[in-house]
Amino acid sequence: MFKRIPGTKDILPDEASLWQNIEESARKIFSLYNYREIRVPVIEEESLFNRSLGQSSEIIQKQMFLIRHQNDVYALRPEGTAGIVRSYIENNLDKKESFAKLYYIGPMFRLERPQKGRLRQFHHIGCEAIGSGCASLDIEIISLADRLLKGFCVEGYKIKINSLGCAKDKKELTVVLHKGLKNKLDKLCLDCNTRFKVNILRILDCKNDQCREVVKGLNIHEEYLCPDCKRHFEIVLKGLDLVNIKYEVSPYLVRGLDYYTRTVFEITHEELGAQDALGAGGRYDNLVKELDGPEMGAVGFAFGVERLLLVARCAPHAGKSLVYFIPLGDEARKEALKLLEDLRANAIACDMEYEGKSLKGAMRKANDLQAKVVLILGEDELKKNVVTLKDMVSGEQREIKKEDLVAELKK
Ligand code: AMP
């Protein structure tokens, strides 16, 4: 028997309906904010991600699914932003509509050690607003993230926010960290010792208690921000207050990818345990240019769907009311096929007993399927040109002329 690959998941029909709810709710909320869907390939050139995410990022260092083909190396996308920016530039959207609000829903791939909340194929619901550096857009996008969570009936989440500043400020922060930490390396964990050499900013959000203590001792606040970035951050925070969004300024929040600048945020939920991030995002004002497009600001975020489902509390929508046919005998089955066609042409969801069950067995099946109406078609009914309709809610049963069936069911 074949088994699925570790870190992947089968989404079986019962669960798939929850996914549909989440996706449907997300689409509605995205359109409230005037975002439009974009679908890009799940496979891109490896170099796109190398250039976007940064050589020293954990994803590039050890989590890429690579496919070698002749002289090319392709990668399964580990995240959505790089491919969308590539598409935005390649399809000249910068010239056609310059400011674009885009959303996406789809699978991402990272070669991680599988554990609860950490898969090798997982799914993002995310968005990108490309073409503006306006601080109001940061506020809007955090409001959008918040509204999505409310739409999914998630409660008890925390929005943490920070500003990394512009590229210059990030360099400045790197220097501050370098100076502050170079004599404290023996107090940092092994990973942070590596980070010190390759990606020093990541030391800030190490979860190790001792590393946290050392970092706290550095007393880093916003002093590395230039006046423009400081102002931008103030506008964002004031705007969030204005629209009543609760947040926590978290001076040690950094994101794992090189492209982030200025506002970064992360949304966590205690119930998720060790992997507590539901979603994250921020500004990436230099990425479009770095991928050979024009200079323009951009901001985005992504939620992990698998983690959303662990904390979403919405009951699934009531299923479409189903009509279930029980034909008794071959002639009845033929007749039922015709009637099924008729009902479906009239947008009435219906199905038929296909396993040759007895009437009793078929009724049990109708119950399992939560059918609202059962239609029984036996020899008697065929002779009289009627079907027997059983209302599964009231239990009432009556004969209906075939030609009246559609109108009756539409009631
Ligand atoms: P990131 O791009 O790493 O900031 O991811 C955004 C969100 O995707 C995270 O907050 C998680 O909810 C989700 N996520 C990231 N990596 C994984 C993974 N390996 N398995 C499941 N969900 C993930």
Image (cartoon, rainbow, N blue to C red):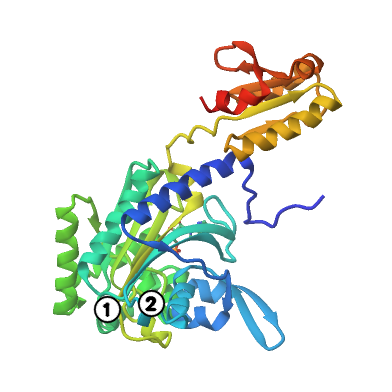
Residue 206 can be seen, yes or no: no
In the displayed structure image, the side of residue 136 where residue 338 appears, left or right: right
Q: Residue visible at 77% across and 29% down?
A: 335
Q: Which mark is residue 96?
A: none
Indicate the amino acid at tag 1. Answer: Leu
Above or below, comparing residue 81 to residue 96 in the picture:
above
Front residue of this view, candidates 283 and 23? 23
Q: Residues within 10 Å of mark 1 (few under 14, many from 20)?
A: many
Indicate the amino acid at tag 2. Answer: Tyr
Q: In terms of image quadrants, where is residue 120? A: bottom right
Considering every residue shown, the one lying at the far right of the view is 330
The image shows residue 229 at horizontal and vertical percentages of 19, 75
In the displayed structure image, the side of residue 357 where residue 126 appears, left or right: left
Q: Kindly state the secondary structure of the residue where label 1 is placed.
A: helix
List the residue tagged with mark 1. Answer: 173
The image shows residue 223 at horizontal and vertical percentages of 17, 75
Above or below, comparing residue 118 to residue 86 in the picture:
above
Q: Residue visible at 19% across and 56% down?
A: 240
